[in-house]
Amino acid sequence: MNIEQEQFLNDTLIMAGFNPKEDDFEILKEDMRAILDEYIELNLYKSLNDEEKAEYDKSRKEDLNLKFFEDRLSNFDAILAELYTNWQKEYLENFND
């Protein structure tokens, strides 16, 4: 379990108006986590060159492997932070519509 991601998901749910005392955050986070991981994976994948994409496709496992991207993208932390921010903004916009 990624502690930072857990906190991010908790914060996002609170920003969306959920109440940790009334709503089942664990179930909500399980649903969100899969969507977030897929969003991050797809967008990090876009940052790879063709050779790296082929390598990733061969090594692809069930779980998101951030280490693969971290080893290949020099600005990985900045990209990841931006992806989290963009995803949260999108989630909240969609949620409030």
Image: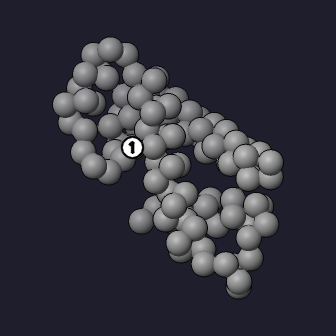
Residue 74, image x and y in percent?
A: 46, 27
Q: In this picture, is 21 found above or below 55?
A: below
Task: Please state which of residues 54 and 27 is positioned toward the viewer in this rendering.
Answer: 27
Quadrant for the N terminus, please.
bottom left
Residue 45, image x and y in percent?
A: 41, 28
The furthest residue to the left: 58
Total numbered circles: 1
Residue occupied by mark 1: 66
Residue 7 appears in the figure: no
Residue at x 39% of width, y 43% of height: 66
Q: Amino acid at mark 1?
A: Leu
Task: Please state which of residues 55 and 74 is positioned toward the viewer in this rendering.
Answer: 55
Side (left or right) of 41 relative to 58: right
Residue 30, image x and y in percent?
A: 49, 65
Residue at x 73% of width, y 46% of height: 94
Q: In this picture, is 60 found above or below 55?
A: below
Quadrant in which residue 49 is drawn: top left
SS type, badge 1: helix
Side (left or right) of 66 relative to 7: left
